[in-house]
Amino acid sequence: MLIEIVTIFMVKFAPYIQTESQKIGRQNVNPKTLSYIVKRILLAVLTVWVVLTITFFVMHFVPGGPFASEKAITPAVQAALEAKYGLDKPLMEQYWTYLVDAFTKFDFGPSLKQRGRMVIDVVKDGLKTSAKLGLIAALWATVAGVVLGASAALKRNTVLDRIIMVISTAFVSMPSFIMGSLMLLFFSVKLGLVPANGETAKGLILPVITLGLSPMANIIRLTRSSMLDVLGQDYIRTARAKGVAPLRIIFGHALKNALIPVITYIGPMLAYIVTGSLVVEQIFAVPGIGRAFVQSIINRDYPLIMGTTIVLASLIVIMNLISDILYKIVDPRIDFS
C-alpha cells in the first residue's frame, strides 16, 4: 500500500519536481539525492511493517477477545464466529495471511463489529472526512502562522510582537483535547453558534480550528525566529543600502528564505494533525478515520484496528518523506550525503 501511494505521488508531482530541479540547476539532481530518496522509501516500508507487526501481536496478546462483549454468547457460537473470521488458526498463520493480503491486495478483511462492511470501505469513508478536515486545518494554520510570525518579526519588541508571542505560547502549551472541549462548551453549548456534532459541514468549523491552533502557534515561532535571522543578514542590509523597496525586500528576499524552516515543519505538522484527529474527532463526533480507530479499539475490532493503523502510519511516514523532498527542492544547498 505504501509503495503504491508513494508511486502515485511521484507520478503526480514528477513534472513539478523536474521543473523545479531545472530551475535550481542540473547539478542538484545527482545520484546522492536519488539514493537518499530510495533509502527513505525503503525505510518507510520497513517502518510501516514494524508498526503493523507490533500492533498485531500486542492486540492478540491483550486479554479478552472481539466477541467477549456479545450478549449471551455460547461457546459453540463463539467458536463458529472465530472460525468464520479465521481467528481459530495459529497466530503466526493469521499474521502471515494478513501481511500478504494487506501488502499485495489492500485487503484488510471484514469488520468484526460493522457487519457486512469491509475494513477498506470503512477506512475510505473515514479518510475522506479526515483528509478534508486535516487539509483545511493545515492550510489556515500555515497561512495564519506565517502572517503573524512575519508581523511579529517586523514589529519586534512592540506590543503587537508581545501579544502574538503570548498567544502562540498559550496555544503550544494547551493540548488539543482541552482546547476542543473548551471551544465545544463555549461556542456550542453556551452560545449555540455552531453544532456540537461534526457530521455536518457547519459542525466541522470547531474541529478545523482546534486542529490548526497548535500548528499555527509553532509556525508563528518558527517564522518569527527565522525572519529575524534573515533580516540581519548582509544581503538584506545591502538591498536596503541600494534603495530597494521595503516590500520587495520583505517578500522577495527575507520571507522567501525565512520559510525554509516552515517547510521542514510541514511533515511533523501534518503528522500532528493526523494523530490529533484521533482525539478531536472523538470529541466533536466527526465520522473520520480517527474516530473509527478509537471505536475499533473500544470494540476490539481486530481487522479495523489493523487497517486504520496501517493507513495512519503510512500517512505519517509519507508526509515526512514529502517534507524532506520539498526541503531539497526549496534549498538546493542541502546535501543528502
Image (cartoon, helix red, strand yellow):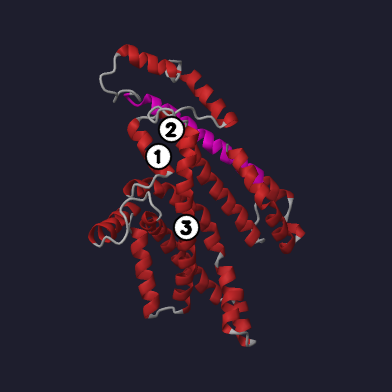
Q: Mark 2 is on which residue type?
A: Leu
Name the residue beneath numbered marker 2: 304
Q: Which residue is found at the position 41% from the left and 56% from the top?
A: 208
Q: State left or right for residue 333 relative to residue 76.
A: right
Q: Secondary structure at mark 1?
A: helix
Q: Are marks 1 and 3 in contact (CB under 8 Å)?
A: no
Q: In which quadrant will I find the N terminus?
A: top right
Tag shown at residue 330: none
Q: Secondary structure at mark 2?
A: helix
Q: Are marks 2 and 3 in contact (CB under 8 Å)?
A: no
Q: Are marks 2 and 1 in contact (CB under 8 Å)?
A: yes
Is 331 magenta? The answer is no
Name the residue beneath numbered marker 1: 292
Q: Mark 3 is on which residue type?
A: Ile
Residue extending furthest toward the right: 26
Q: Secondary structure at mark 3?
A: helix
Badge 3 density bin: few <14, some 14–19, many ≥20, Cα 10 Å:
some
Residue 185 placed where, x, y %?
Answer: 25, 57
Residue extending furthest toward the left: 190
Is 58 magenta? The answer is yes
Task: Tell me the CA gap for discs 1 and 3.
Answer: 20 Å
Establish if 270 lies above or below 48: below
Establish if 112 lies above or below 258: above
Q: Earlier in the sequence, mark 2 or mark 3?
A: 3
Q: State left or right for residue 109 relative to residue 6.
A: left
Main SS category, magenta section: helix
Badge 2 density bin: few <14, some 14–19, many ≥20, Cα 10 Å:
many
Evaluate whether residue 28 shows in this view.
yes
Residue 97 placed where, x, y %?
Answer: 53, 22
Name the residue beneath numbered marker 3: 136
Q: Mark 1 is on which residue type?
A: Ala
Q: Which residue is found at the position 46% from the left and 27% from the top?
A: 110
